[in-house]
Amino acid sequence: RDSDGTIHYFYGYTVTDSEGTETAKYIDEDGLGLTLTEIYVGSAIENYEISNDAGDKLLFDSDGYLTKQIDRIGNERLFERYGSQLYRVLLKPFGESAITQINYSYTSSGRLEYIDYPQQNKRVYPSYTTVTYAENGSTVSLDLISGISYRILSSGSYTEYASASYIY
């Protein structure tokens, strides 16, 4: 799913290089020039790469988390995680050292506490909204970060939630 919510589907084929190594590749069904490649280390999938005809790339780890974005001229944006929690975003301009763009801090229970933007000397504290809904005869409460739209599947149908913006 891309940033506007469009779901992209890929169909597969196998490529054999000059040394006889086979690589699984997948092309998007819509003809947008997107290619999905599985990157192996030994017999295990290490990463996935989605590239476009212009040379831009997105790399994902074996769990499906975005780890790196590379543009066509070689600028990189790195996404560093501890488990499933994103804790830092770095920018590495082509041929330069990496610069921290964003740091994320979490409470001991795993809730996002604040976001730092070191280059702007700015810290953002998210506000939360509690949403309650019924699921299989039980009441479920979720604390959602305000300012983000959510789609929650409950009892076979989606409900949209959106709330106020961040507190600066």
Image: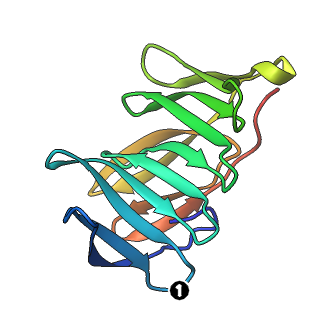
Residue sitting nearer the eye, 101 or 13: 13
Quadrant in which the C terminus appears: top right
Q: How is the image coloured?
A: rainbow
Q: Where 93 sits versus 148, above or below?
A: above
Q: Which residue is drawn at 43% across and 56% down?
A: 49
Q: Where 100 sits versus 132, above or below?
A: above
Viewer can see residue 161: yes
Q: In this view, does 120 lie to the left or right of 28?
A: right
Q: Position of residue 23 (x, y in %)?
A: 26, 64
Q: Residues within 10 Å of mark 1 (few under 14, many from 20)?
A: few
Q: Where 142 sits versus 123, above or below?
A: below
Q: Residue at x 37, y 62 (%)?
A: 37
**In this view, which residue lies farthest toward the bottom?**
30
Circle 1: residue type: Gly
Q: Position of residue 72 (x, y in %)?
A: 66, 56
Residue sitting nearer the eye, 38 or 113: 38
Q: Position of residue 14 (x, y in %)?
A: 25, 74
The residue tagged 1 is: 31
**In this view, which residue lies farthest toward the top?**
108
The secondary structure type at the circle numbered 1 is loop
Snapshot quadrant of residue 154: bottom left
